Image: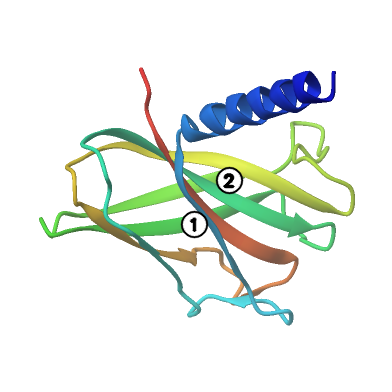
Amino acid sequence: MHNKSLILTGLFLATILLAACHEPTVYFHFEHTPENGWEKSDVLDFGISPMTQEGAYQEELALRISAGYPFMRLNLIVDQTIVPSGEVSRDTVDCKLTDELGNITGKGIGQYQYFFPIKPLHLQKGDSIHISIRHNMRREILPGITDVGIRVMKDER
């Protein structure tokens, strides 16, 4: 009976590991912003390693914002360079953080997490991406933004 439970446990773990191998996320990383506020001149950089497969990829901007953030929106500029082709693109992402009534739409308590799509990309095997993000708000220093992240997922369709 002991061997049977060991075999079942092994099969269960193998199933979990195989399922984890099909995770479409190929990159997910956060950069912290300064505690005293994110200055307009502070650029957050992300270096994404070369892709192992050619195909379609979806990018998302991830944010962690505390209850101390004073605005209903956040406007970010996302600059991307694909290496080795040198293709450069710039996206302005308007992050709506509340609904029409001013209620926070992020997930969490006290600190809220959000995801916003950037744009789909078609990448070749071996392509890497350099991404720079900065805020484009009128205020020079933004309090309450704790982390900014990038998630890249392989489109499995």
Do the numbered discs 1 and 2 sit on residues whose CB atoms are within 8 Å? Answer: yes
C-alpha gap between disc 1 and disc 2: 8 Å
Residue 64 picture location, percent across and down = 70, 55
Marked residue nearer the N-terminal end (1 or 2): 1
Q: Secondary structure at mark 1?
A: strand
| Residue highlighted by disc 1 | 76
Q: What amino acid type is highlighted by mark number 1?
A: Leu
Q: What amino acid type is highlighted by mark number 2?
A: Cys
* Residue 8 drawn above or below residue 139: above
Q: From the viewer's perspective, is 47 left or right of 86?
A: right
Mark 2 neighbour class, 10 Å CA radius: few under 14, some 14 to 19, many 20 or more: some
Mark 1 neighbour class, 10 Å CA radius: few under 14, some 14 to 19, many 20 or more: some
Q: Quadrant of the C terminus?
A: top left
Residue 49 picture location, percent across and down = 32, 59
Q: How many discs mark residues in the rendered view?
A: 2
* Residue 90 drawn above or below residue 95: below
Q: Residue at x 65, y 63 (%)?
A: 147
Residue 18 picture location, percent across and down = 52, 28
Residue in the foreground of this view, choosing between 55 and 87: 55
Q: Residue at x 78, y 40 (%)?
A: 107
Q: Which mark is residue 66?
A: none
- Toward which corner of the image does residue 65 lie, by quadrant? bottom right
| Residue highlighted by disc 2 | 95
